[in-house]
Image (cartoon, rainbow, N blue to C red):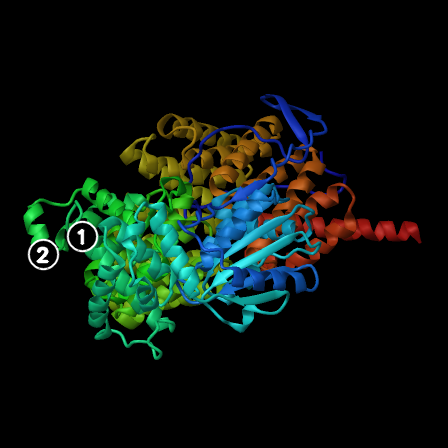
Amino acid sequence: MNSPGLPKGESLARDPGPHDGARVTHSGDAIASDGGIAITGIQHGDISIQYHQHAAPAGPAWPVRVGRVPALASAFQDRSGVRDRVASARASASGVVLTQVLTGGGGVGKTQLAAAYAQEAIRDGVDLVVWADALTSDGLVTALARAAIAVEAPNVTGQVADAEADANAFLDWASTTEHSWLVVLDDLADPDMVLDWWPVSHVGTGWVLATTRSRDALLSGQGRKIIPVDVYEIHESLNYLSQRLADAGQSNLIDDKVAELVAELGYLPLALSHMAAYLIAQRTTTSRYLELFLAEAHTLDQLMTGDPDGHGRSPRGQRRSISTALLLSLEAADSHDPVGLARPAMALVSVLDPNGHPEQLWTTRAFCSYLGAHRSSDKAVAEHHDGSRPVTPYDARRALLILDRFGLATVNEKAAPESVRVHALTTRAAWESGQAVALDVIGAAADSLVELWPEQTHINGDLVAVLRANTGIVNRRSSQSGDLLWLSGHMPPVLQKAGRSLLDAGLYNIAVQQWATLATTASRLLGADHPDSLDAGINLAISYRRAGHTSEAVLLGERIATDRDRIFGSDDPRTLSARAELAVSYRHAGRASDSITLEEQLAFDRERILGPDDPATLRTQINLAVSYRRVGRTADAVVLGERIVENLTRGLGRRHHRVRTALGELAVSYRQADRNAEAITIREEILSERERELGVEASETLRARSNLAVSYRDAERFGEAISLGTAVVSSRERILGADHPDTLRARVNLASTYREAGYTSNAIDLGERVARDRERVLGLRHNDTRRALANLALSYADVGRLTEASRLLDDVFPALSRLLGPDHPDVRTWSVCMERLRGAMRSVGNSES
């Protein structure tokens, strides 16, 4: 069904080799239509396609709320002076970008002010209110992505793995929408980080309110106005305490020392909050609290230099006020059942993310063991507790609720996986006040994160993102204390898991940054030749390759392979694995001959050292077959594949999983050798076995279904090919996200099927989407982007859009030809297409003249 004179198209996205497969699961098998078609009546060998106009989507139900706006604290103070400055700034704002930045020290109430504005916007019926935790880039991007989903922004994917894409979709929507909106960026830590994610409104319907402790010059200008926020005025402090205690029915606790007490606390809202919670829980008067505070503060003065003016208004003085109030609250909390756990519990919290951690951490063995080992050992504990009894998850949970009762933590199960939050300055005060043995608490927190980390990270995206954020805080505390996580002499497992989870999520550019940092740190602390340093280098090389930085991947891979050969010897499994990864990088860099040379030697060495049936030997032989196919040595790939299957079947039987893997690769070689009937027979057998053994939603089943769809297309069984292909696309979009490499690869294959089936309009629609997505995610120079553009060019040629097709192929063909070599089947297809395009364009030009 191709246009006359042009070559029949073929998938430009080859079946992934064993080094490319991502682990996925599948939670449904719905057939999704693309490009405005409905697929019906699919049978073997035919397809009925009905074009129809889709009904307009209903759209979101306005108003929309995204994120958890903090509840206003008891006895919230309206801060009329700050509000006047905000109102003045909004009134005088030029242009259409309205942004105010509330800046001030920790604990002065910036977040509470922002929460008050957000709640007012909700009451006033503002169409969209977004509350975004901006302490980390992950938190900010995730919030904006969720907003994009909520408002159904154009081009939104709705997948965790595509958070950056969806965040950009929201920014595009916000800049032009007529809907009113407010976005709060709370606790902005790094102004550089947020510059690319700062929402703007070009039509004057939006407002951004940010809170930060930073006074960086980047926060001002371009429509942004900085509003300083200081501690309470004296009347606000007294009003707060009076109202707080009155609400609790404890007004009698206020006496003639109250003014002196709030002055000692520096009028700092967070310190006043700790103090009020203590008074209510302990039925203590302001006079008695002042005595306790002064005694505790004297002790802290030995640890921390007081502020110059003695009023607690400097940052150091504010920390001292909070630290003192914290210690008093902890002392009281420690006496509540379960006795002696409040202090070690607060120590654990002090090394976790203030924006939230999963409550399940409190049930881990590491958490409970730490609480038991560091339980307070004063007289009260001895009287109320048998120190030999271990701390249970139930005990740990009760300790957490005690922290909540004294205002030291906030527990909200509905906010999972960020169920437990603690004010950032409270965690800092707990840390700086020496409430923990740093090595023990950092180790316990890291171990608990490892314990909670799910095996299937790609289907637990929200939880893994929160675990990564907490890992970042633990690592920061470790770095501040002398890299305590590394004292074991090995790379910390929690950092390895965080880095690998980025690769699993398809966040390759972020993975490059993470593994580059880990490689540098490992080399500095463990030595460049340490096995973990070399492992970090391998992971960095993989990240480079998957991010499209093939030159960097090759250079680093060569160095790691040389170092491992020197340190461990040429026959060590670690050396062989480094050479195997280098061979894959060679292939992706277009150095197929180098890849083949290395893999042929590696296959021989692994069979000699490990034996012919070892999985590593099999992987090497399969990768060698992939490289043979890459350079057009199809006959060699077939011979090698048949030998692998024969040898494995003799020893393991036809149904062994290694035999299935080898059969799958042999089917790819058969397909390239135009032995498609044999390829289909194998792939139908594999899919049947995968569905029976693993289920229809397993990752290997999905891969088998995708491969069979390609073979059906080659056999012109288009109904079955489109049915399977759309199912794979739908599943991978839902599970991995629209921008994951496997999802994009599935779309390329489906677009090729549409083209060969004659549904060129659908092929173009899908091909253009894939090209845009790959350019946005990977960049225009990435080879996967070039492949998508080349595939799109074939579809353009089919409908006579010769100029566009020629331009695309002229742009991408030279690089792809160098990468794949002149004998690669895809290169031959593109080359023939280019020649015929040029001939067709010359004919058109002559006829017009």
Q: Could you tell me which quadrant the C terminus lies in? A: bottom right
Image marks 1 and 2: residues in contact by CB distance under 8 Å: yes
Looking at the picture, how far across and down is residue 193, in whole percent? 50, 63
User: What type is the residue that disc 1 sits on?
Assistant: Asp
Q: Residue at x 8, y 46 (%)?
A: 384
Looking at the picture, how far across and down is residue 272, in whole percent? 34, 59
Tag 1 residue: 334
**Reading the chain from its start, which is encountered first: label 1 or label 2?**
1
Badge 2 element: loop
- Residues under labels 1 and 2: Cα distance? 10 Å
Q: Nearer the viewer, residue 237 or 518?
A: 237
Q: Nearer the viewer, residue 469 or 134?
A: 134
Q: Could you tell me which quadrant the N terminus lies in? A: top right
Q: On residue 383, which mark appears?
A: none
Q: Residue at x 43, y 37 (%)?
A: 664
Query: Is residue 274 toward the left or the right of residue 833 in the image?
Result: left
Alpha-carbon neighbours of circle 1 within 10 Å: few (<14), some, or many (≥20)? many
Q: On residue 378, which mark appears?
A: 2
Q: Residue at x 53, y 38 (%)?
A: 671
Alpha-carbon neighbours of circle 2 within 10 Å: few (<14), some, or many (≥20)? few
Q: State whether residue 481 appears in this view.
A: yes
User: What type is the residue that disc 2 sits on?
Assistant: Asp
Looking at the picture, how far across and down is residue 67, in whole percent? 48, 46
Q: Quadrant of residue 255?
A: bottom left
Q: Nearer the viewer, residue 164 or 525?
A: 164
Query: Is residue 797 toward the left or the right of residue 141 in the image?
Result: right
Looking at the picture, how far across and down is residue 112, in whole percent? 45, 55
Q: Is residue 559 above or below residue 691?
A: below
